[in-house]
Amino acid sequence: MKRLPPLILIACILLAWEAVSRSGLWNPLLFPPLEKISRELVLFFTRPESIMEAFVSLQRAFAGFALAAAFGIAIGMLMGRSARIAALLDPLFSGTYAVPKLALFPIFIFVFGIGSLSKVALVFLECLYPIVIVTSQGARGVSRVLLWSAANMGASRAAALRRVVIPAAAPFIFAGLRIALPIALIVVIITEMVSSADGLGYLVIYSLSSLKTDRMLAVVVVIAALGWLLDRALVMLRDRLVYWEKLETYYV
Amino acid sequence: MGLARAGALAAVLLLWQLASLLWGLPDYILSPLEILRHFFTALGSRELYEDIGASLGRALPGFVIGSALGIALGLAAGVSRVFDDTLSPVVFLTYPVPKIVLLPLFMLWFGIGDLSKVLIIALACFYPVFINAYYGARSTQRILVWSALNMGAGPARIFRRIVVPSAAPQIFAGLRVSLALSFIVMFAAEMINARSGLGHMIRIAENSLRFDLMYVSLASIAILGYAGDRLLTFVREKALAWQEQPA
């Protein structure tokens, strides 16, 4: 029952789209009929080339995201548990937080080349910030009583880290990852649109410039679905690992 | 805190400058002093101001439109069941979708001029503000609403005097995210397709190997992003002076 309203709304949007495209008031290039879009969608999944483009984009997003997660969680943990490291790194992160890292892309192209590496590096950099900031908040907020109890019962520092700090920070870590995952996809798509050589972002721009708007919309649908599916997958993983705390809000 | 911030940044810049003096850097990495020199040269020219003006002319209207809609609809969904049932599922369903992919579609519908860029920025800014306003309004303490009702306040008064102030800190958190986002989307849109603005400038510089201009554009967007964030934090502190600062 809870799933019904969005479905109704989506159906209304699709109906309105079809009505607009059939009305003949606008050029069919601007509002291609649903039938053509769905045909292109089927074509997308049957052509190996387009599957390859999706694979390339996903690979870049995952590589950058995984690197950012590994480094981000480690840095965030260190910043949360050590005042000295926090004093050293916090100014760097909070000072450059609001600066659009995307502007570094042209320089990254010169440093890392036009291929995947410059895109992965940019995804890494953009994803690093939310993960570090939210993880360090979580690691800092670990209840002292829990740490004292663990020490009292003879837990070593390593054991306390593994059994107390990491579980306590886990919901925060996942909150950071959840902010970073859509960013990874956005950055990959943007950089592929800009450098225009391969990937889903390139496919969107290429279909537009060859006036295949139905194909372009099919790719847009695929990207939207990917964004949604990745988010769902992360939430499912989170609910498995952090089963003791129910997910309620997007942000901590 | 200010000193520590300056210290860490100064150390990085010093290392960078030393590296360029001792070993020499490749052509595409300028030293901080060179960047500073080029930046001040560019400050003397009219082009930089035109590009900054064009960029702000896209980012700010997009930010204002998207945030205003986000606050209005987010608060509405937070207090009214009808709005909650119709709006929230759609917003949360489409939240993880990268909005920038709609830029080509918007270019078809609204032309390749500024309108399509302003609208895509507004769309991107809408989401964080909506979600924060929504949770901010929903986290209003019941006891405050009950007390107000008990003292004879009407729904409009409760909304204005209790729900909005309760949601304000979270709304500002959303605004901070969306302001940063507006600059990112603006820069992306200008890199993909524009004839002016900082994103366009960096593309032109890249294509003609004018590394000095690349760094001028980079420095400008960095300063704008940082200044915008500080300004918003300043406004927040003035507007929410009554709120206890979190540690």
Image: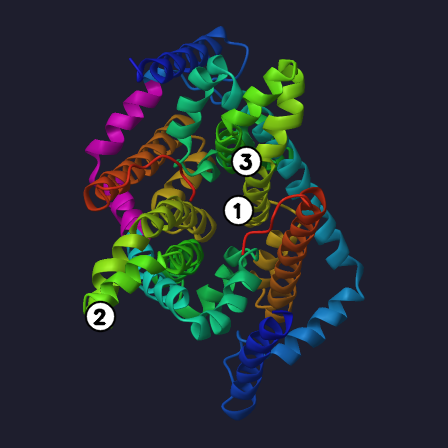
Q: Nearer the viewer, mark 1 or mark 2?
A: 2
Q: Which mark is residue B192?
A: 1
Mark 2 neighbour class, 10 Å CA radius: few under 14, some 14 to 19, many 20 or more: few
Magenta span: A36-61
At x 50%, y 64%, the residue is: A93
Q: How far apart, in angstroms, are the residues tagged by discs 3 and 2?
A: 40 Å
At x 40%, y 10%, the residue is: A15
Q: How far apart, in angstroms, are the residues tagged by discs 1 and 2?
A: 49 Å
Residue B94 image offset from top left, x and y in percent: 40, 30
Q: In this view, does A234 lie to the left or right of B10?
A: left
Q: Which mark is residue A158?
A: 2
Please state the chain letter of the residue tagged with numbered disc 2 in the rendered image.
A
Q: Which amino acid does label 1 sit on?
A: Ile
Which of the two discs, 1 and 3, labels the residue nearer the N terminus?
3
Q: Can residue B196 be seen in this view?
A: no
Q: Which of marks 3 and 2 is in front?
A: 2
> From the image, which quarter does the C terminus of chain A lie in?
top left
